[in-house]
Image: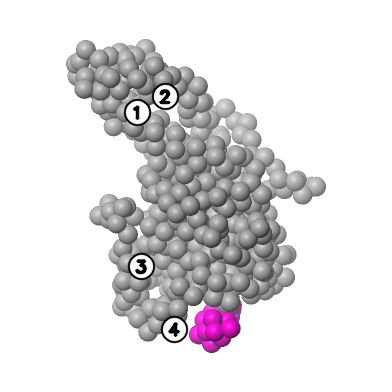
């Protein structure tokens, strides 16, 4: 009961998006994994629910999910289809969340800032579902325009940052003009959180920094801007509150709340739980990998499924292109010379079936099977511009193209996340998760494959575990 008392006394009176709620926040998980039903249940329990505006599901008249099928022939027209799907889906989820919450708690919408047409989509969603949404959460990029956009609709905004430096840049350039609607700052630990992570080029992905010291630095920066009253929402690595007791009622940190992303997947309301639970329950420490494979160019953390394993192996089958050599391969109709020192490797790869060489933007080639080459080219051709800039397809929202050739070492993120969120085999897709996902197998709460309701999970969290 200690932690229930601790929360009620020190955290429960916090105002988040304008009302008093328990400082427990559902982490937004893109492409339908957190939706109106999950976020509505978190809000109904007096907490903060977060649904994703990234490829959100729409429903037909019978309540069935409408598949995202693109009919347009041109990339530009498919982009318009993508935007209409996104707006329709997010509005539908916002209305579901409001109904399920029954007016309790708070409902937030989460969007990847580097999502294609993010500003247009958010603007239209807020226009059509303003009464259902209390806060907008954005990460994966520097959302300078977030403050003005949210303030215009009278909703709170929550930037996701991984350092004090990032928040300082956002505040000085934009947020200081719209302080009244800054609802909180989400600190997402780049070494522990799932999905896209905010590691800078100066940070070593293999050497995690102390989260407490980074949080203290963030709070000091916020205090310099007179933001003592603004809570920091701690995300990434949060499983048991008993492990965070030193962060609660801590004068150096001030107001804090806690976000639960991966843990909220295993609830009866989560649409992905049926297909994800067996994989999540089998994970061991280290089975979540931090890589730079995402077509966004950001680091990201995902479960080491067959798909991720194959992508990592693909990068190993890579050879530098040189001006002249006795080792040559054909890339489509062009002869390309390769580093002679890799001859034995190349011969082995071809013997093993990886007989097709594909050029990368880094003046190298990677070796793939004929089937993989065909699928890569098909996926690149079907690009719907779901990102503002994509390494895999060379799409760029600002210029139409990145100016580089498509990168076969990456993948179509929209396709695989749609698949894994809608009963696709997790082993054959990208499955984002935080680095503590192995705890599903260790936590006695989940013994005998128990799947709690959201309310049961929140009650468990409040107990400290």
Q: How many residues crowd around disc 4 within 10 Å: few (fewer than 14), some, or many (20 or more)?
A: some
Decide which of 189, 39 is in the foreground and name it. Answer: 189
Check residue 249 in the rendering and tell me which mark sits there, or answer none. 4
Query: In what quadrant of the picture does the N terminus appear?
Result: bottom right
Quadrant position of residue 449: bottom right
Q: How many residues crowd around disc 2 within 10 Å: few (fewer than 14), some, or many (20 or more)?
A: many
- Residue 259 location, x and y as percent? 51, 67
Check residue 368 in the rendering and tell me which mark sits there, or answer none. 2
Evaluate if marks 1 and 2 touch, with contact meaning CB atoms under 8 Å apart: yes
Decide which of 260, 91 is in the foreground and name it. Answer: 260
Magenta segment, which residues? 1-21
- Seen at 48% across and 47% down, the residue is 303
Q: Secondary structure at mark 2?
A: strand
Q: Secondary structure at mark 1?
A: loop
Lower sequence index among marks 1 and 2:
1
Q: Tell me: residue 55, above or below residue 340.
A: below
Q: Secondary structure at mark 4?
A: loop
- In the image, 255: left or right of 455? left
Q: How many residues crowd around disc 3 within 10 Å: few (fewer than 14), some, or many (20 or more)?
A: many
- In the image, 336: left or right of 40? left
Q: Marks 1/4: CA distance?
A: 51 Å
Comparing marks 1 and 4, which lies closer to the viewer? 1
Lower sequence index among marks 1 and 4:
4
- Seen at 47% across and 19% down, the residue is 370
Residue at numbered disc 1:
317
Q: Marks 4/2: CA distance?
A: 54 Å
6 part of magenta stretch: yes
Residue at numbered disc 3:
211
Whether residue 411 is visible here, answered yes or no, is: yes
Q: Marks 1/2: CA distance?
A: 8 Å
């Amino acid at each position: 009961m200690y932690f229930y008392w601790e929360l009620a006394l020190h955290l429960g009176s916090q105002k988040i998006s304008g009302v008093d709620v328990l400082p427990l926040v559902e982490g937004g998980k893109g492409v339908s994994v957190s939706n109106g039903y999950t976020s509505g249940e978190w809000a109904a329990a007096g907490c903060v629910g977060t649904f994703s505006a990234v490829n959100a599901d729409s429903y037909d008249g019978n309540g069935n999910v409408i598949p995202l099928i693109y009919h347009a022939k041109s990339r530009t027209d498919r982009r318009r289809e993508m935007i209409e799907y996104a707006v329709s889906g997010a509005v539908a989820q916002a209305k579901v969340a409001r109904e399920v919450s029954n007016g309790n708690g708070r409902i937030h919408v989460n969007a990847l800032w580097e999502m294609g047409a993010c500003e247009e989509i958010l603007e239209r969603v807020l226009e059509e579902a303003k009464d259902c949404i209390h806060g907008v959460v954005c990460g994966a990029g520097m959302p300078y325009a977030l403050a003005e956009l949210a303030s215009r609709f009278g909703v709170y905004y929550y930037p996701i940052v991984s350092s004090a430096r990032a928040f300082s840049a956002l505040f000085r350039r934009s947020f200081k003009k719209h302080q009244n609607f800054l609802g909180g700052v989400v600190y997402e630990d780049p070494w522990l959180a799932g999905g896209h992570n905010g590691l800078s080029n100066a940070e070593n992905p293999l050497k995690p920094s102390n989260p407490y010291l980074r949080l203290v630095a963030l709070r000091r920066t916020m205090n310099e801007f007179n933001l003592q009253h603004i809570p920091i929402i701690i995300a990434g690595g949060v499983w048991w509150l008993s492990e965070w007791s030193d962060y609660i009622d801590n004068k150096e940190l001030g107001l804090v709340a806690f976000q639960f992303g991966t843990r909220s997947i295993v609830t009866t309301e989560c649409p992905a739980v049926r297909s994800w639970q067996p994989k999540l329950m089998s994970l061991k420490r280290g089975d979540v990998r931090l890589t730079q494979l995402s077509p966004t160019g950001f680091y990201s953390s995902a479960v080491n499924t067959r798909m991720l394993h194959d992508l990592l192996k693909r990068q190993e089958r890579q050879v530098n292109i040189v001006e002249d050599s006795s080792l040559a391969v054909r890339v489509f109709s062009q002869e390309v010379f390769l580093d002679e020192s890799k001859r034995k490797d190349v011969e082995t790869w071809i013997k093993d079936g990886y007989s097709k060489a594909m050029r990368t933007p880094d003046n190298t080639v990677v070796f793939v099977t004929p089937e993989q080459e065909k699928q890569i080219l098909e996926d690149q051709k079907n690009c719907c511009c779901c990102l503002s800039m994509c390494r895999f397809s060379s799409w760029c929202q600002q210029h139409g193209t990145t100016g580089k050739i498509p990168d076969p070492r990456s993948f179509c993120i929209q396709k695989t996340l749609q698949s894994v969120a809608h009963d696709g085999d997790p082993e054959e897709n990208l499955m984002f998760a935080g680095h503590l996902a192995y705890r599903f197998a260790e936590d006695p709460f989940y013994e005998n494959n128990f799947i709690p309701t959201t309310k049961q999970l929140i009650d468990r969290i409040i107990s400290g575990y």
